[in-house]
């Protein structure tokens, strides 16, 4: 059964340690281009708010305005002003207080000369990270996290996800796939050893889950009862493994899960026991740090192409004229040696890994990555990864 913290307008996520102090000499910034009438802005932001120990972020959020990095993150959000914002790497808090404090103490307070912003609806999601599987997955003769967790983490809910919204959620139709077994996926890219044997033991495969964190379909109720399904996930990075490429293959199949979901594959059984994927007439947006670049990086078998090339994904945003871009990415990653256009990068390590991918029935009109160049306003908020090593990605969608 799906287990999520949901308060009337409040839920929680968080990040790692930050320096104390005030934002010094914040850069003035012109308001972003005014949105067209009946247009909403959707965004994804890996805020890197994951603590080293359980409860660290929740404790910091009790006095959130003491932390300069968190104030910078809030200032970025206030400048972009998304109507719906998905946060990656915000530690799960079972009380729901951390996200509420983030909203009330930082977003509800003007930062860096920008207007305050409020999100009356919030939700955070449980995560497989740091959740002990009860099986010796790493075969070191001990059953302990992080090596034997369903997803890498030193405590349960580390690196979790959350959402902030100006519009309510359809609570009765939320679906999650936190418990879906990897072996239940047709044509799963299960890792194998050089001799052709399975990398994971039979005992491990009996419990091993596809999702390293969670895969959640959260319906959002927009004006005129328009429903947008927010498909939220944060696949594991395709690194930190060996020649078996276990993390690369898991990343591939975590992305495949959403590709199969929007293809209505019958094998998909959610945490409440309901089968099937998303109906063909449903509108959706895929949000998240997918840890996969379409050109560069260590992805297995061009993992993100499963979504970018999908017939139900809007191709202008996926691969065309509306790929989110920035001047800062070009400036920072121009000499990285990568083949992809650095304008499309969403991270300081030179890859496009963060996505907001609307379904093809929607009408995107503009997009961007909040990454000012050194000559542009607000550069001081993001320079050298001072707020996060990822940048906020946004897409504007017009509704008739």
Image (cartoon, rainbow, N blue to C red):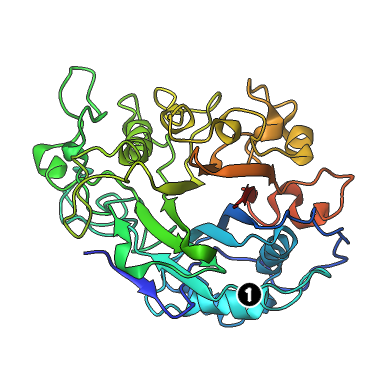
Q: Is residue 379 left or right of residue 178?
A: right
Q: Is residue 49 left or right of residue 383?
A: left
> In this orientation, does residue 51 appear?
no
The N terminus lies in quadrant: bottom left
* Residue at the image point whose x is 77% and y is 57% from the top: 381
Q: Is residue 68 above or below residue 108?
A: above
Which of 280 and 235 lies nearest the eye of the viewer? 280
Q: Position of residue 240 (x, y in %)?
A: 41, 37
Residue 130 position by quadrant: bottom left
Q: Position of residue 348 (x, y in %)?
A: 66, 41
* Residue at the image point whose x is 22% and y is 25% from the top: 192
Q: Is residue 230 left or right of residue 253?
A: right
Q: Which residue is under mark 1?
A: 118
Q: How many marks?
A: 1
* Residue at the image point whose x is 71% and y is 33% from the top: 343
Q: Is residue 232 above or below residue 323?
A: below
């Amino acid at each position: 059964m799906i287990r999520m913290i949901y308060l009337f307008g409040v839920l929680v996520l968080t990040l790692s340690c930050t320096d104390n102090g005030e934002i010094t000499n914040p850069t003035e910034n012109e308001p972003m281009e005014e949105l067209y009438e009946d247009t909403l802005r959707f965004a994804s932001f890996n805020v890197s708010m994951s603590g080293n120990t359980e409860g660290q972020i929740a404790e910091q959020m009790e006095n959130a305005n003491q932390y300069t990095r968190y104030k910078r993150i809030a200032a970025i959000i206030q400048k972009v002003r998304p109507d719906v914002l998905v946060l990656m790497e915000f530690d799960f808090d079972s009380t729901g207080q951390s996200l509420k404090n983030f909203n009330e103490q930082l977003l509800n307070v003007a930062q860096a000369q920008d207007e305050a912003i409020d999100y009356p609806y919030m939700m955070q999601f449980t995560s497989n990270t740091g959740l002990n599987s009860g099986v010796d997955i790493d075969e070191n003769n001990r059953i302990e996290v992080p090596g034997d967790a369903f997803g890498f983490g030193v405590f349960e809910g580390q690196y979790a996800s959350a959402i902030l919204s100006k519009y309510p959620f359809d609570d009765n139709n939320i679906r999650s796939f936190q418990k879906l077994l990897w072996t239940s996926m047709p044509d799963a890219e299960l890792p194998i050893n050089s001799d052709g044997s399975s990398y994971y033991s039979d005992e491990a495969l009996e419990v091993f889950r596809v999702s390293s964190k969670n895969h959640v379909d959260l319906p959002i109720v927009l004006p005129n009862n328009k429903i947008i399904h927010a498909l939220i996930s944060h696949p594991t990075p395709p690194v930190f493994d060996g020649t078996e490429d276990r993390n690369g293959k898991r990343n591939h199949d975590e992305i495949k899960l959403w590709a199969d979901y929007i293809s209505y594959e019958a094998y998909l059984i959610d945490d409440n026991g309901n089968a099937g994927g998303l109906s063909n007439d449903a509108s959706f947006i895929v949000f998240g740090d997918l840890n996969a670049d379409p050109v560069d990086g260590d992805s297995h078998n061009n993992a993100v192409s499963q979504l970018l090339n999908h017939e139900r994904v809007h191709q202008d945003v996926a691969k065309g004229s509306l790929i989110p871009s920035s001047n800062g990415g070009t400036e920072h990653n121009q000499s990285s040696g990568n083949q992809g256009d650095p304008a499309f990068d969403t991270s300081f390590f030179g890859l496009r890994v963060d996505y907001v991918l609307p379904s093809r029935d929607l009408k995107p009109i503009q997009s961007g990555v909040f990454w000012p160049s050194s000559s542009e306003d607000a550069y001081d908020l993001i320079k050298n990864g001072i707020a996060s090593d990822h940048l906020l990605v946004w897409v504007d969608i017009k509704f008739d």
